Amino acid sequence: MKLWAGRFQKETDTLVNDFNSSIGFDARLYRQDIQGSIAHAQMLGRQGIIEAHEAEKIVEGLKAILADIEDDKVEFSLDNEDIHMNIEAMLTQRIGDAGKRLHTGRSRNDQVAVDTRLYVKEEIPVIIGQVLALEEVLVKKAEANLDTVMPGYTHLQRAQPTTFAHYMMAYANMFKRDVTRLEDCLERLDECPLGAGALATSTYPVDRFATAQALGFKKPTDNSMDSVSDRDYAIELLSALSILMMHLSRFSEEIVLWCSWEFKFADLDDAYSTGSSIMPQKKNPDVAELVRGKTGRVYGALVTLLTVMKSLPLAYNKDMQEDKEAVFDAIDTVELCLPVFAAMVDTLTVRPKNMAKAAAGGFINATDCADYLTKKGLPFREAYMIVGRLVNLCIKTGDTLDTLTLKDFRAISSLFDEDVYQALALKTCVNERKVYGGPAKESVEKQIALIEEFVAERK
């Protein structure tokens, strides 16, 4: 018999039972559910809502159930719908009437809310740790490539010279923001909904501050209706994870490009790539492509939950059961992607010669040529036009700015002198960009130090 069966005259149809059941996916909340129930039972005993010896019996029974679940000795039942009712039914079966007192002053609405918050509270630090491990890989790659000049791009067109180290720090700063977003989410969700009841608390003298403290929350939630109907923390988490996956996807796209024969800026380690069943020459960037693909899956979880919540009146509605699969799948996906992505980047072989060769073409020192003229007193817009004419000349002759003769330069502007060649050297172009945040070696070293400090503070 179902725990809520008193009002009903018929058994639940098998189709409805299967449709309604969530035990197939919320079983993973068993530990959080038992943790919340222990805190609730201890509070009931302390408040005199149930007898102290009954509270002790409940706690002992719950601990025994937890041990059996972790020893794989428990089989959950679809008839009991969800993890909460499964555990309560098991408890009552094991300890008798005392088990029936556990749900006093509590609803499944606040029970599931606290379970899910506890779960998310545990998983966010895991993901943060994985992102920090990736940051360490990026620092390592940057330190090894401070002088590795490569083209920087806009519109996927070669634009200005930079270094591979500068590139790595760009992604490191993206992932830094991901960490802080997750930390913000963790801060906001650190409120305990237990004791909110179905929506309007309880007539029992429930001590919500005690249960919040026992479960490691900063405080109880301030409004009971909001407590059971709020899924903002889950939506915020999925948003933060979607942005994180977007960053991983962008990086994956770079790796796919860099490892193609058209770029050949890098090579994947054999352990982090695959071959073709028909083309023996192929080395496919499957890890990067899968990360890129799984990004859509995490986006889907965010859109799912936003859509589920968009029209729900207060307070709890059964629609909200749909939150868990979306949250679980997004967390699982991110935690699957981050370690393998970090390992792929860590084992990536950089090809500095190919990067330098690409940087030598495409006139990426054109802006520096214009800056050369402005430093000699010419207004920038005039300098821009002069360099545009030089680039047009190079296109016609097959030259680069570096290979033009001084005569060619002076034919267009008398301001050019022998020192133009030093000014146009790619290493000069990079290392003169000493502005805070720029690609100059000393600037990138500061960026590396900031990321190292950020990681160290959180380790």
Image (cartoon, rainbow, N blue to C red):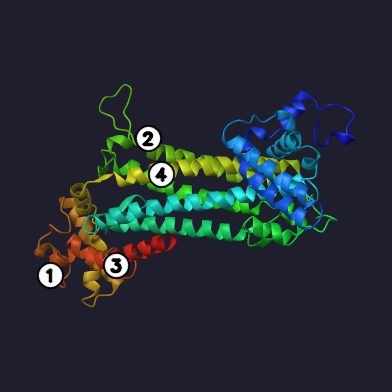
Residue 312 in view (yes/no): no
- Considering only order in the chain, which callout, 3 or 1, is on the residue closer to the N terminus? 1
Closest to the observer, 326 or 399: 326
Secondary element at tag 1: loop
Does residue 128 appear left or right of residue 251 in this picture? right
Quarter holding residue 305: top right
Give the alpha-carbon distance from disc 4 to disc 1, as whole Å. Answer: 48 Å
Residue 437 lies, in percent from the top left, at: 34, 66
Closest to the observer, 152 or 271: 271
Q: Amino acid at mark 3?
A: Ser
Residue 192 lies, in percent from the top left, at: 68, 56
Give the alpha-carbon distance from disc 2 to disc 3, as whole Å. Answer: 34 Å
Give the alpha-carbon distance from disc 1 to disc 2, as whole Å. Answer: 47 Å
Q: Residues within 10 Å of mark 3 (few under 14, many from 20)?
A: some
Does residue 24 appear left or right of residue 201 in this picture? left
- Considering only order in the chain, which callout, 2 or 1, is on the residue closer to the N terminus? 2
Q: Amino acid at mark 4?
A: Pro
